[in-house]
Structures are given as C-alpha cells and as structure tokens.
Image: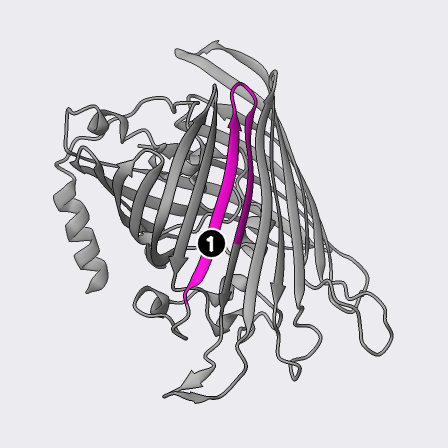
Amino acid sequence: MKNYLALFILSAWSIVPAFSQDTDSTYTNLEAIFNRPFIYEAQGGASSASIGGYVEGNTNYFSTDGISDGFSMELRRFNIFLFASVHERIKFISELEFEHGTEEIALETALLDFEIHPALVFRMGILLPPIGYFNQNHDSPKWEFVERPLVSTDVIPSTLSEVGMGFYGKIPVGKHKFTYELYLTNGLSNGIIANEQNRTFLDAGKSEEMFARDNNGVPAFSSRLAFNVSHLGEFGVSGYTGIYNEFEIEGEPVDDKRRVSLFAIDFNLQFSKLQLISETAWATIDVPEDYGQQFGNKQLGTHLDLIYPILKKDMLGWKGVTLNLINRLEYVDYNQDVFKSTGTKIYDEIFAIVPGLSLRFSSNTLLRLNYRRHWERDFLGNPVSKTAGVQFGFASYF
C-alpha cells in the first residue's frame, strides 16, 4: 500500500515541468543537494516548483578466486527530486529513491531552508550529515565510476540521512569562499555492532526508527568546514559524533554510554585538465568488551580518483562529447586493533584499483566502463582473496 501511495504522489507531481542545464562550476560542496539541473529554472522564477531526478543502471561480471556467478544486469537506482521556492528566502527539497526496482524505497532528503542571511541559513528536516565530500554529493551522474567509494559507504555510512536541524552558511573571502555546516540529528543505533556482518559496520547502524525517534534521546552532532579556492577546488574537514546504544530503559541504566565518532578530510581539485577527488575517514567506536575482537574499535578508509579528459569533440551529432581516462585507488581497514593475546595485527582489510573510461555527453549524462580488481584479507590474516570484474553502465539526470 505504501508503494502505491508513493507512486500516486509522484504521478501527481509529473504535471510540473522539468528543466535541465549544465552544472554551475562555482558551486561549493555545501550546495551539492541544490546543484542539480532541474532546479535552475525554478529558481529563476519561471516556476515555483520543479521535478527532476536521475536514473542509473549497469552490467556486472565478477569472479572471486576463479569462481563467478556469471553476467548480470541491474537498474540500480531511480531517484525523484522535488524542489520548491516556497518564498524567496525559503526553499524546500526532497529526494525519493527506488533501489533495484522497488526492492528498497527510501526518502533520502526532505527539508526546508530558511535564509536569515547567506552566511546564516537554518535547515530542518531529513538531511544529509556533512561527513566528508561524498554523503551530500552522491548523485551517480556526477561520478565517473559505477561503484561508490568503499570509504564512503563502509566507514562513512553513505548515503546517511537523518532527521535533524542546524545552520549552515557561505562567507566570501576575496575571490574564494568559506563554508560551514553544524547539525544536530537523531544519530546511528545499535546495529553498528548488532548486525549480520559480524564486524563493526557503521552502515548497519541506520534504521527506519531513526526517522521517528532517537533510540537513546541524545542527539548526534555533525559539522563540516571547507575552503573553496577559485580556479583550484575545495578542501574540507568534517566530523560526526554521537551515542549509538540504548543505555537506559524507562529511566534505569542498562549499559554504559557508547560513542561513535568520525573524522574526515576531503578535497576536489583541478590541476589543468587533471581532476583529483579524495576522501579519507577515521572512525572510533566504543565496543563492549564481551564482543569478540573481530569487532574493531577503530577503522580507516581512503580513496583517490584521478580523471583526465583524453578527447573532447563533436561526434555522431552530439556536441562536446568528452572521453575521460579514469582510475581509482582505495583502501579500507575495518579493524585497526591488534590481537590481545599475541600483539599481532588484525587484518580485515580491502585494497582496490579501478581503472576505466567514461564517455560524457554533458554534465548530466555519461556512459562508464570500469575494470575493478580488489584484494581482501579476513581478520585472521588468511591468504588474500582476489576479486576481479568488469562493469559497464550509464547514469543520467532528467
């Protein structure tokens, strides 16, 4: 019934015209959720409301240690955006995601912004905590790679949506820009350690209940400070911290307060034609002593994307088509602890390299071909498991 209701609402909105325009390169990461092509005309006054979205699909062929499940195809995401200029200083935006058809339907964003001043805007609703660069800037058509960075999904639990409120602002510094964000949200839950992965896994700390209530009554706090340098790019520093467990039941203590904290640095830089995008995150988690050592107290992840255009020309009736040579290097250590009995390293880590090509028809639409190879070791340090595969896919705003 809920699925039919969601489809009915979307059908009603379909009468609102959609608009498309190339992305404005002057946008900072702070403004990522508004840096979407369907918004521009609505902000220009031609319409008070607008609808848009993106679609993403790909093929997969992978083998692990010589064993493969064969070739498969998937329509990974179909996302709908709704935007409205409620007032010249009040904006509404939402994002509804359909993943793998209707296997998962999630409301990722639904918020109101009240502009007191460009340097002081109040935000409230379902928002994206500003942890690193990716969580707020996760739309598939913006990325040259089929898969999302491991650090952005397994250490930082992107896409992380939480109910909350706070302030953000943009302050000019000569030709440059300084941005800040400060939010209180409901926060992650016990699933961080009580999960099927049998390891500390922050993504499992997300739950449907977090959109209705905080499981322990103590809000999480997130923030990001960034400096956007004209003609170079953006540097960001961010953090997230909160109590994740239920430590009281009806006022009676049942556990210690257990905290999860994230710290991240990121950059998106342009050196002549070469673009570099990177995000590094550290997580610390207070894990109960009676859990096994496969549940790590500390995690680390990083990635570096290199994107270089090797051809840009008109072809087959399309103008300004760009062929990019791309490569991603990434590493995640799910458990940075050592064994108490021997003092030797606990492994549980992945290293991956993802070379490929992307063919951009515009900032809105691209085709991408990735070869992915990664090496994985379990927490005992057994011989490396090797996975390799090819992915071909598309992503497009509409």
Is residue 60 depicted above or below 247 in this figure?
above
Name the spot of residue 81 as percent of width and height, x first: 28, 41
**Which sits in the foreground, 136 or 240?**
240
Query: Can residue 75 be seen in this snapshot?
Result: no
Is residue 149 depicted above or below 275 in this figure?
below
| Colouring used for the render | one colour
Image quarter in which the C terminus is found: top left
**Which sits in the foreground, 65 or 192?**
192
Secondary structure beneath dot 1 equals strand
Q: Is residue 238 magenta?
A: yes
- The structure residue drawn at horizontal position 15% and vertical position 45%, both measured from the top left corner, is 11
**Which sits in the foreground, 305 or 101?**
305
- The structure residue drawn at horizontal position 17% and vertical position 58%, both measured from the top left corner, is 5
Q: From the viewer's perspective, is 126 left or right of 394?
A: left
- The structure residue drawn at horizontal position 64% and vertical position 42%, both measured from the top left corner, is 303
Image quarter in which the N terminus is found: bottom left
Say which amino acid is labelled 1. Ser
Name the spot of residue 50 as percent of width and height, x first: 20, 35
* Quadrant of res 201: bottom right
Q: From the viewer's perspective, is 76 left or right of 122?
A: right
- Residue corresponding to mark 1: 222
Instruction: Determine the main secondary structure of the stretch shown in magenta.
Output: strand
Is residue 152 depicted above or below 213 in this figure?
above
Q: Is residue 328 magenta?
A: no
Query: What residue range appears in magenta?
Result: 219-239
- The structure residue drawn at horizontal position 40% and vertical position 50%, both measured from the top left corner, is 128
